[in-house]
Amino acid sequence: MCNRYTIGKSKSEIANQFDAMMIAEIDASYNVAPTQQVAIVTQSEKRVLETAKWGLIPSWAKDPKIGAKMTNARAETVAEKPAFRSALARRRCLIPADGFYEWRAQLEGEKGKKQPYYFHLIGGDLFAFAGLWEVWRDPAGDWLKSCSIITTTANEVVEPIHDRMPVILRPEDIDRWLSPEPYETQDLLSMLTPYPAEAMEAYPVGTAVNSPAYNTAEAVLRWNSA
């Protein structure tokens, strides 16, 4: 699963990197959590940087609360699940980030809180998760845009901490992932693979990030147990 990530870059940096027009205010966040409004990049006639609620609400849903259970879509089943298959075919997006958190399960005999780890690209570069977006109409007739992050099996950097990781799109796949042109399902699924481990690194951070309310640049500082 991926239920916390960071996007510390400015909105202009995000827009420039992904060649997108800004149509929403985007604030830096060092502890992005489910159900929050998050930055996404979509493309139809133009490529735009906008926001969506994290937790995809299918268009046919009767209750928007289902979105809280739809923060992630598994790459292995995304083309089959009713909640995601239409979005995979027609509503793909980028979810800009510069890192994400996962929690290591406690070893036998350990006490206290699970240890959070921070994962990022070597050099701290901005990247994009493979995302899906959807729109849902509430009873009042208002439209709500929501999104989900696709996950895959963990690479060698993430695997010691968690068996899943978010799909980080390779730069050469970004235009194809965003393209409104139709693609064969297998072509899309071929992009949903673990990011090369040699391009990533990880380290422990303080347990203060367990709370989504803790949202400062200090959240990503390396934790030293000594």
Image: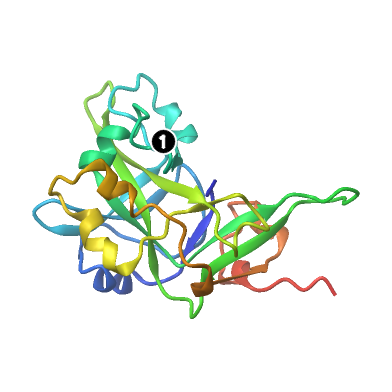
Q: Which of 69 and 177 is in front in this view?
A: 177
Q: Which of 38 and 184 is in front in this view?
A: 184
The answer to whether residue 23 is seen in the rendering is no
Identify which amino acid the numbered label 1 is placed on.
Answer: Thr
**Could you tell me which secondary element the residue under label 1 belongs to?**
loop
The picture quadrant where one finds residue 226 is bottom right
Q: Position of residue 102 (x, y in %)?
A: 61, 55
Q: Residue furthest left?
A: 45
Q: Which of 75 and 8 is in front in this view?
A: 75
Q: Position of residue 156 (x, y in %)?
A: 59, 63
* Crowd tier of the residue under label 1, counting other residues whose Cα lies within 10 Å: few below 14, some 14–19, many 20 or above: few
Q: Residue at x 48, y 34 (%)?
A: 68
Colour scheme shown: rainbow
The picture quadrant where one finds residue 207 is bottom right
Q: Which residue is drawn at 47% across and 67% down?
A: 196
90 sits left or right of 212 in the view: left
Q: Is residue 172 above or below residue 4?
A: below
Q: Which of 185 and 89 is in front in this view?
A: 185
Q: Residue at x 28, y 25 (%)?
A: 138
Q: Which residue is drawn at 37% across and 72% down?
A: 10
Q: Where is residue 15 in the image (x, y as percent from the top left)?
A: 26, 68
Q: Is residue 148 above or below residue 39?
A: above
Count of numbered circles in the view: 1
Q: Residue furthest bottom?
A: 123
Q: Is residue 62 above or below residue 104?
A: above
The answer to whether residue 44 is seen in the rendering is yes
Q: Is residue 70 above or below residue 108?
A: above
Q: Position of residue 82 (x, y in %)?
A: 34, 26
The residue where tag 1 is placed is 77
